[in-house]
Image (tube, rainbow, N blue to C red):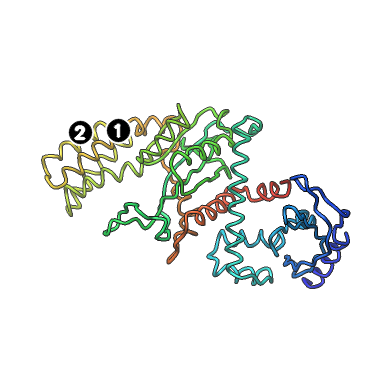
């Protein structure tokens, strides 16, 4: 059936006799492209291989060739149809390139080389990035206004390390024993909305409302990226904006600069990790004492009584000399973020107080594809795949292809 389909498709594609458009065509630089000949091009489609006949034009001044039909069929510089490239890009976003060609052969009956999947995926990833950039420009200009807006919008931000090739970590300090970095931080942001509460008063995330953006880039650049995403989701019309993250300073710098006036919440699970590190440093292996002490801190934190947590840690300073530096650091952490830890107030307002959505996003969007055993990426390559995965997992894949078709 594929063979029959490819024969029919080839006849349809060549029914225009090569898309001849006259002896000359204008060049953007004021020259003319002159018709030279008809040239055949082997093209792999979802139905199988076909041969496409195209009129070929040449500009003697610019010394460039041009086939108008290639532009119409979206096959400039490639021997794969848009449909095949779409399959390759989606498979490349989900599977290692070396395994993806087996999936394509098994499910679509198409034979492509792993390197071709890699090239197609990176090229599409770069196009997705351009799609997001142009869309962001329109929202920032006010030419497009979101129609659907929910009462409460959440912006969650986190970072996760991506293994990269050695050249990408030159002169960068790392956490390893040798002091050299082996990863680069990929910043991931997710935007989702909330409209209702459940019967117990807990917030319910709106179904299919989560969208992702991410890249290995500076916090300043990423701040503009996540702001544009929130803007496209109806930021300016939302009644409440909530930013959730851990204690990383760059996250709260973004919150202050891009989402001024938003409710800021430290993820409660990250906050708990900090008093747990204190307990382990002071009480060592005394599990019973650790449990008693941390249970008290848990209750205090749940009720937003951060000052009591701070006081409890200060009372331990005289019990340890080796861990004194750690305790002082944790005291500073709670002091600095105490207004972001009023969890009783946040719960009373019916808000989420955990960053589980973005943490799951770090695993799903980045970890499952870019952090598999033996993988090492260039920053550019990693960003291309992150862009692809964000687009697909944000349910923007069809929007991207419509943009390409209209471009």
Q: Quadrant of residue 269?
A: top left
Choose between 353 and 255: the one closer to the eye.
255
Please provide percent x and percent y for residue 25: 83, 50
Choose between 52 and 276: the one closer to the eye.
52
Please provide percent x and percent y for residue 207: 57, 43
Residue at the image point whose x is 58% and y is 36% from the top: 233
Which marked residue is nearer to the observer: mark 1 or mark 2?
Answer: 1
Choose between 4 and 405: the one closer to the eye.
405
Residue 357 appears in the rendering: no
Left or right, 323 with reference to 11: left
Please provide percent x and percent y for residue 202: 46, 37
In the picture, the disc for residue 336 is 1
Please provide percent x and percent y for residue 153: 52, 34
Left or right, 65 with reference to 220: right
Disc 1 to disc 2, how far (Cα)?
14 Å
Residue for badge 2: 311
Instruction: Specify few, some or many for label 2: CA neighbours under 10 Å numbering under 14, 14-19, or 20 or more.
Output: few
In the picture, the disc for residue 394 is none
Residue 380 appears in the rendering: yes
């Amino acid at each position: 059936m594929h063979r029959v389909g490819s024969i029919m498709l080839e006849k349809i594609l060549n029914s225009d006799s090569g898309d001849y458009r006259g002896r000359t065509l204008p060049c953007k630089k004021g020259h003319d492209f002159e018709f030279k000949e008809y040239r055949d091009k082997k093209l792999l489609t979802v139905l199988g291989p076909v041969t496409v006949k195209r009129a070929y034009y040449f500009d003697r001044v610019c010394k460039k060739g041009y086939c108008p039909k290639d532009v119409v069929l979206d096959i400039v510089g490639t021997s794969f149809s848009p449909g095949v490239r779409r399959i390759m890009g989606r498979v490349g976003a989900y599977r290692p390139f070396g395994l993806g060609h087996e999936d394509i052969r098994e499910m679509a009956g198409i034979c492509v080389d792993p390197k071709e999947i890699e090239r197609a995926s990176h090229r599409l990833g770069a196009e997705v990035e351009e799609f997001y950039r142009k869309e962001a420009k329109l929202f920032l200009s006010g030419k497009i206004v979101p129609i659907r807006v929910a009462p409460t919008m959440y912006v969650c931000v986190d970072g996760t390390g991506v293994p990269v090739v050695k050249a990408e970590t030159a002169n960068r300090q790392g956490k390893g024993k040798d002091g050299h970095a082996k990863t680069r931080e990929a910043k991931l942001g997710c935007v989702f909305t909330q409209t209702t509460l459940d019967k117990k008063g807990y917030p319910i995330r709106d179904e299919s409302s989560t969208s992702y953006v991410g890249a290995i880039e500076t916090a300043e650049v990423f701040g503009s990226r996540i702001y544009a995403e929130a803007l496209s989701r109806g930021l300016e019309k939302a009644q409440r904006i909530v930013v959730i993250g851990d204690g990383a300073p760059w996250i709260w710098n973004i919150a202050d600069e891009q989402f001024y006036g938003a409710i800021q919440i430290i993820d409660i699970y990250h906050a708990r990790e900090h008093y747990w590190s204190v307990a382990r440093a002071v009480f060592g292996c005394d599990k019973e004492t650790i449990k008693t002490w941390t249970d008290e801190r848990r209750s205090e934190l749940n009720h937003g009584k951060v000052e009591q947590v701070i006081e409890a840690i200060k009372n331990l300073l005289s019990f340890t000399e080796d861990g004194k530096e750690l305790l002082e650091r944790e005291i500073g952490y709670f002091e600095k973020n105490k207004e972001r830890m009023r969890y009783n107030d946040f719960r009373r307002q019916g808000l989420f107080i955990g960053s589980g959505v973005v943490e799951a996003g770090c695993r799903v969007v980045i970890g499952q594809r870019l952090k598999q055993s033996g993988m090492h990426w260039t920053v550019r390559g990693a960003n291309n795949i992150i862009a692809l995965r964000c687009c697909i997992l944000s349910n923007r894949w069809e929007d991207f292809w419509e943009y390409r078709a209209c471009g």
